[in-house]
Every structure is written in C-alpha cells, then in structure tokens.
Image: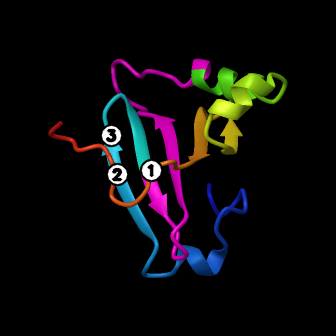
Amino acid sequence: MLVACGWVCHTDAGDSRLRVEVLTRSHQLARVTAPDGRAAIVKQPIHGQAYSRGLARELYVYRLAKWVSALEEVLPSALCLDEQRGLLAVESLAVGRNWPDETD
C-alpha cells in the first residue's frame, strides 16, 4: 500500500533497513519505518474475527479534514485513504522509539 501511494519506492520496499513493527488489537496496526527514517502508521480492520471494528468513522474524519482546515491542522497527514477496503495510512508523529508497548 505504501509503495502504491508513493510513500516508498520499490527499491525501498526491498531494503533491509525497512522496518515493519506490528501491534494488533482491535485493528491491524503497523508502524513502517523507511530506510531514510520516515515513519508511517498503517491501520486496517482485522478480517475474519467475530467482532471486527471498522475504520469508517476515522476515515470519515480524515475525508472531512480536506474541507475543514481546523481538523487538518491537528491530524497527522493522511498518506492513503481507502474507504472501500477500510485502509488508512498516516504519517507517524512518534519520534524515536516512542511506540505503544503491548504490556502497557
């Protein structure tokens, strides 16, 4: 998805320095760190579970931010929105190793 939206190129996708850290709870959530240090958060629903919490509301807020500048100012930049598949990729605002701890 991040290659398709142009956030990383095909050569970056094969780079050994590309890191994908996965934290899954109510959504599949991954932090992807590019070889150049940029980071993105990718979210999608967990398919096949009895209860799958969708991203419809969150995707709506990001779509709404295109017209409401006050929202756009406080949200991380959206890299890719796919409402049909329920996928969201946004810039990561975390600096360094500031990632949720599953035991927290």
Do the numbered discs 1 and 2 sit on residues whose CB atoms are within 8 Å?
Answer: yes
The region drawn magenta spans 31-57
Q: Earlier in the sequence, mark 3 or mark 2?
A: 3
Q: CA distance from mark 3 to mark 1?
A: 18 Å
Q: Going by the image, does 45 lie left or right of 3?
A: left
Q: Which quarter of the image is occupied by the C terminus?
A: top left
Expressed as whole percent of the image width and height from the top left, the position of residue 29 reads 42, 42
Q: CA distance from mark 1 to mark 2?
A: 5 Å
- For disc 3, the marked residue is 24
- Residue at 84 percent of width and 24 percent of height: 67
Type of the residue with mark 1? Ala
Give the secondary structure at mark 2. Answer: loop
- For disc 2, the marked residue is 98
Expressed as whole percent of the image width and height from the top left, the position of residue 92 reads 52, 50
Type of the residue with mark 2? Asn
- For disc 1, the marked residue is 94
Q: Which quarter of the image is occupied by the N terminus?
A: bottom right
Q: Going by the image, does 27 lie left or right of 82?
A: left
**Front one among 23 and 37:** 37
